[in-house]
Image (spheres, rainbow, N blue to C red):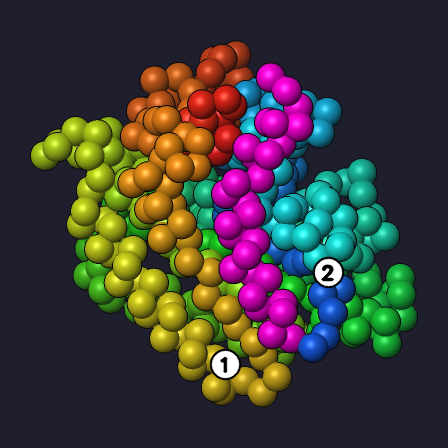
Amino acid sequence: MDYQAGMANMITIPFIFFIQILALGSKSEAKVSAIIVFGDSSVDSGNNNYIQTIAKGNFEPYGRDFPGGIPTGRFSNGRLPPDFISEGFGLKPIIPAYLDPSLNISEFATGVCFASAATGYDKATADILKVIPLWKQVEYYKDYQKKLRAYLGDNKANEIISDALYLTSIGTNDFLENYYGTLSDRRSQFTVQQYEDFLIGIAENFVRQIYSLGARKLSLTGLPVIGCLPVQRATNLDDRLSCVEERNRVALEFNGKLKTLVAKLNKDLPGLKVFFADAYDILLRLITKPSEYGFEVVEKGCCGTGLFETASDGDRAGEGKSSTLHIIRKKTTNNFH
């Protein structure tokens, strides 16, 4: 395959996402000094490589279109949206994982990722696969700030912290792995609406905490069409391989509450600009009109049968396996994880 053509195809989804984030940056008079990332596998650039969990993406076929063709821990064939967003703002094209022991604060000064695949707002979600909970990501961020001040001095560090763009993409696992999963007690503790409110409360506390630490430009990504992810389609006993519309309704309901929270935070916290990034409509357009974006298969994951296989650290030899939480098969290359 022609490399330049492949790169053009790979940019499709991140570019759509980038347009939304660019709207936040363009409304701010301050420059974007760094990209700082919190969340789950949608934005994890490799932190799970360095913790004891089976939720890893550091083996093939992951990374096949990444520079050098190597798996990095990103649950993707190539770069993730934060990488493209960083490059779009004139910063580095690859956001490094904070837990990478080969890197130091000089590599993190203009961009760093604290995200962890399989995590969620709810600490109980992170406990399922022993990954990094959101509260711990904030603790790593505090540690990052200390190192940044020691490296650059207080004034320069504070400038980077306040001018940075904070990207947060999280929440899918709270529903699919946790609330609707088989290893959780949450359904006996909450109705789904109560659980949504519980997560919104955690999201608000998170934003207020990083605001108190200096964050002033923040993107909160909503839930995608979770009922259309391959594992949900495959386990839809009523209409196999069709979307589970009840799950999609939950996603829309949660997103509505998240939008209300965004409006509240913008009103309550002076100097803060919070932006709601709509992952639902983006993915829905890809699913309903895949050919317009160069895709041909939307009901299966990219590898294996695309239905149930989920590769882990212990079965790397299983060629072609890939998490069925991540979708989409391209005509020319497996573009999404």
Q: Residue at x 36, y 75 (%)?
A: 260
Residue 336: % across, % down: 48, 33
Q: Is residue 122 visible?
A: no
**Residue visible at 60% across and 74% down?**
27
Is 18 included in the stretch rendered in magenta?
A: yes
Mark number for residue 266? 1
Q: Which of the marked residues, 2 or 1, is nearer the chain's N terminus? A: 2
Q: Identify the element where label 2 is drawn.
A: loop
The dominant secondary structure in magenta is: helix
Q: Which residues are magenta?
A: 1-28
Left or right placement of residue 197 versus residue 55 in this view: left
Q: In terms of depth relative to the viewer, which is nearer, 153 or 163? A: 163
Residue 45, by quadrant, is top right
Q: Nearer the viewer, residue 2 or 59?
A: 2
Q: Determine which residue is flagged by label 2.
A: 34
> Could you tell me which secondary element the residue under label 1 belongs to?
helix
Locate residue 5, reporting x and y percent: 61, 27
Q: Residue furthest left?
A: 238
Question: As drawn, is 22 to the left or to the right of 294?
Answer: right
Mark-to-mark CA distance, 2 and 1? 21 Å
Q: Amino acid at mark 1?
A: Asn
User: Residue 302, relative to residue 283: is it above or below?
Assistant: above
The residue type indicated by label 2 comes to Ala
